[in-house]
Amino acid sequence: MAILEKVDKLHQAIAWQGDIPITNRYTAGVAGERFLREIKDHARILGTRCPDCDLVYVPAALFCERCFAQLDEWLEVSSQGRVFTFTVLFRDLEDRPLDPPAVLAYVKLNGSNGGLVHYLGEVEPDQVFIGLEVEAVFKEASEREGSILDIRYFRPLKR
C-alpha cells in the first residue's frame, strides 16, 4: 500500500518505528506575554474584555472567540475565584508515586468568564470541593520568572 492511499480498514494501517529529530520553541504570543509579564512584575492577573459580547477573557486573548472582535481593553481581574472542577494526582508524569498527592483545579476567577488550571495548596485533597473559594499565592518578586508558575498555587480563602 502506498503512503498516499486511503486507509479504509484498521488492518491496512502501517506504522513506522523510529525517532523524528524535531525541536520547537513555544511562545506565549502578544496577549500571553503581557499576561505573564503582569504576573511577574506586579503579581496581578489581567484579562481582556470584548466590547461586543462583554466577556472577560482569562488568560487574556487578542480576539473574541465568539464574535472575533479585536480585544483592546485590558483590565485587572481578581486573584480570587472558585474551584470549578479538580482532580487529585497520585503519580507524576514518569509514573512515580507522588507523596503527598497533588491537587490540580480549574479555578474560575471572579470578575471574568475564564480561569486558570493550576495547583491547589494549603488544603488536603479530601477537603477540596466544587465551589471552594480560593485565592492565588504568588511567589516573592525576586523569585518570579515570567511563568504561570509565578503563581505558586491557589489556597482556600480564610473566612
Image (tube, rainbow, N blue to C red):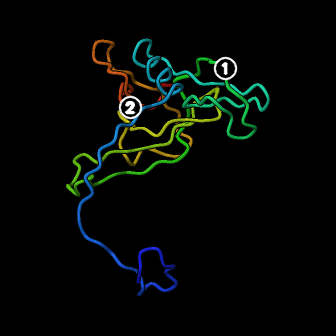
What residue is drawn where x is 50% and y is 20%? 34
Label 1 – label 2 distance at C-alpha: 29 Å
The one nearer the camera, 109 or 129, is: 109
The one nearer the camera, 81 or 113, is: 113
Is 23 above or below relative to 8?
above
Residue extending farthest to the right is: 52
Image spot of residue 143 (x, y percent)? 28, 17
Question: Residue 55's quadrant in the figure?
Answer: top right
Which amino acid type corresponds to the residue marked 1 in the rendered image?
A: Asp
For label 2, the SS is: strand
As drawn, is 42 to the left or to the right of 96?
right
Image spot of residue 123 (x, y percent)? 37, 37
> Callout 2: few (<14), some (14-19), or many (20+) C-alpha neighbours within 10 Å?
many
Q: Which mark is residue 30?
A: none
Question: Residue 71's quadrant in the figure?
Answer: top right
Image spot of residue 11 (x, y percent)? 41, 87
For label 1, the SS is: loop
Is 104 above or below relative to 19?
above
Q: Are marks 1 and 2 in contact (CB under 8 Å)?
A: no
As drawn, is 155 to the left or to the right of 57?
left
Residue under label 2: 153
What residue is drawn where x is 45% and y is 44%? 128
As drawn, is 21 to the left or to the right of 131?
left
> Callout 1: few (<14), some (14-19), or many (20+) C-alpha neighbours within 10 Å?
few
Q: Which marked residue is nearer to the observer: mark 1 or mark 2?
A: 1
The one nearer the camera, 24 or 57, is: 24
Residue under label 1: 72
